[in-house]
Structure formats: structure tokens, C-alpha cells
Image: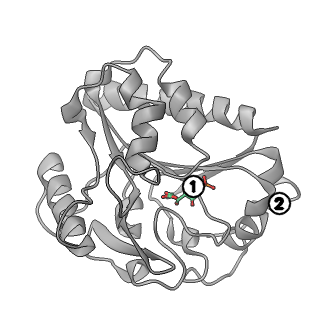
């Protein structure tokens, strides 16, 4: 039975501080219970200061494995790369083994080939067979103004993918590589970080009693265990967060 927790923090700084606290708690719990923590990162701008804050922490970096929930289909050193953002804000600043960092490949023949390659990489890392879904400890997510999450954009083919871990996303014709909804929903702890008034209409639809998840893809995220929504005051202003799926 999923537990959904919504917290509205006073401002962006409060959101980042709370996000840091929560993530540190989950990292410690995962390492205590299983010896390692697997965490998949969100891209975009919201989490960048959070990654900078994590980099200031004294953590057992050899026990933390970092993945990405989605990636723009650009080289790893491109300004739009989610990998580049997280490396600059966090990973390049700490003593984490290179083998603990698992970027989504974007240098193959096609986006579909790279999606398939990353699926194989995940299967090998978690020691699972095709058709099985691994359980990440933490998956961090944001939402767009259109209620997309990861690179699961409204009315795109990736929303329907149920039998794969990774799919090709599509943002206005631009290819992305994304975790699928069923993979995200296997996670122990899904944490959304949302900031800014522009996200209010999307949040209203995500938390509405009934709305089309193909139009508001973040509604597809219904993990089995814990789903956290950390909102800053602007995003959370006036919202009713009791409903939703
Ligand atoms: C990406 C993200 C995407 C992001 C949202 C919110 O690759 O851009 O993974 O899903 O989380 O678009 O982005 P902001 O944090 O910049 O608002």
C-alpha cells in the first residue's frame, strides 16, 4: 500500500534543506539495510542546488551508486546534459568511485539502441533477467509545467511502455532516454522536488481526483512504498493535495 507524503516548505531554500535531510535519511537506511544505496537523479534546474548540498556531506561514497531517471539525447559534456549538471554540482566534488556512476548512454547509433543498452546495463547491475524490474532505493523526480516527469511527456509513446525498464522519450520531437513508469513505480522511495508558481496548474491536475494520466504523466507514478512530494511555497500555494491517485 503506497504512502504518499506531501510537504510544503516556505521557500526554495527550505525545499532544498528538507530534500537534503530526507535523502540523507534514505541513503543511510538503504546502506544500513542492504549495504549500498542506489539513487536515480532528476535533471532540470530544481535539483541542482540539492546536488551541491549533498556534495558537502561526508558520506560512504563507495556504497552509493548514482543513476539518472532520464537524459537528454546529447553528449555527456553538452550544456543540456543531466549527467553534466550532476557531475559539476556534485559528483566531481566527492570521492565517489567512477564505477559507481552509471550514466545513460547517448553515443550509440540511435536513441532506441542506447535505451536498450542502458536496460542491459541495469539488468547486469541488479543481476536480473529480461522482464524483471529492479527496485531502486531512491528515485528523484521533478515535474514540468505540463505535468511530465522524467522524460515521460504527455501523449508520447514512452507512456505506454510496460515491459521495459528504459524507453525513448520525446519532447517536442527531441529524443530523450527515460526510465519507464513501471520501473519508477518499483522504487522504495520516490521523491518529487517541485518549485515555482508555474508548477501549480500541473500539481492541481496531478492531485485532482480524476484526470487523464496520458495528459498529466506524473499521475502514472504510483510507487508501491513511499512517494514524497516536497514543494516550495510558490508551487504549493493554495493547493489541495489530499486527492490524486
Ligand atoms: C529533465 C528532467 C525533467 C525535469 C522537469 C522539471 O531532463 O529536464 O528530468 O523531468 O525534472 O522538467 O525541470 P525543472 O526542475 O527545471 O523545472
In the rendered structure, the answer to whether residue 85 lies left or right of residue 113 reads: right
Above or below, 214 against 11 in this view is: below
Q: Nearer the viewer, residue 162 or 113?
A: 113
Please tell me in which quadrant of the rendered image residue 173 appears.
Answer: bottom left
| Ligand 1 within 8 Å of the CB at mark 2 | no
Q: Nearer the viewer, residue 57 or 22?
A: 57
Task: Identify the secondary structure beneath mark 2.
Answer: loop
Above or below, 201 against 223 in this view is: below
| Ligand 1 within 8 Å of the CB at mark 1 | yes
At x 22%, y 73%, the residue is 110
At x 13%, y 67%, the residue is 130
Residue most toward the right? 238
Q: Position of residue 79 (x, y in %)?
A: 46, 50
Ligand 1, what quadrant?
Answer: bottom right
At x 38%, y 46%, the residue is 83
Instruction: Identify the residue under disc 2.
Output: 239
Amino acid at each position: 500500500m503506497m504512502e504518499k507524503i506531501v510537504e510544503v516548505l516556505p521557500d526554495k531554500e527550505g525545499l532544498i534543506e528538507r530534500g537534503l535531510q530526507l535523502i540523507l535519511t534514505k541513503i543511510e537506511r538503504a546502506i544500513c539495510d542492504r549495504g549500498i544505496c542506489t539513487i536515480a537523479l532528476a535533471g532540470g534546474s530544481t535539483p541542482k542546488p540539492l546536488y551541491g548540498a549533498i556534495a558537502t556531506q561526508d558520506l560512504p561514497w563507495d556504497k552509493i551508486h548514482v543513476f539518472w531517471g532520464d537524459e537528454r539525447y546529447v553528449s555527456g559534456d553538452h550544456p543540456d546534459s543531466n549527467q553534466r549538471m550532476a557531475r559539476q554540482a556534485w559528483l566531481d566534488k566527492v570521492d565517489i568511485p567512477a564505477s559507481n556512476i552509471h550514466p545513460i548512454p547517448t553515443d550509440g547509433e540511435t536513441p532506441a539502441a542506447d535505451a536498450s543498452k542502458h536496460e542491459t546495463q541495469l539488468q547486469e547491475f541488479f543481476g536480473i533477467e529480461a522482464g524483471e524490474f529492479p527496485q531502486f532505493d531512491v528515485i528523484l523526480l521533478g515535474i514540468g509545467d505540463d505535468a511530465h516527469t522524467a522524460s515521460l511527456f504527455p501523449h508520447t509513446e514512452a507512456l505506454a511502455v510496460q515491459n521495459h525498464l528504459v524507453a525513448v522519450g520525446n519532447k517536442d520531437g527531441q529524443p530523450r532516454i527515460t526510465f519507464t513508469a513501471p520501473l519508477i513505480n518499483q522504487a522504495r522511495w520516490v521523491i518529487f522536488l517541485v518549485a515555482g508558481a508555474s508548477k501549480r496548474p500541473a500539481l492541481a491536475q496531478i492531485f485532482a481526483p480524476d484526470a487523464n494520466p496520458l495528459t498529466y504523466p506524473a499521475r502514472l507514478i504510483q510507487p508501491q512504498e513511499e512517494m514524497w512530494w516536497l514543494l516550495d511555497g510558490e508551487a504549493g500555494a493554495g493547493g489541495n493535495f489530499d486527492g490524486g491517485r
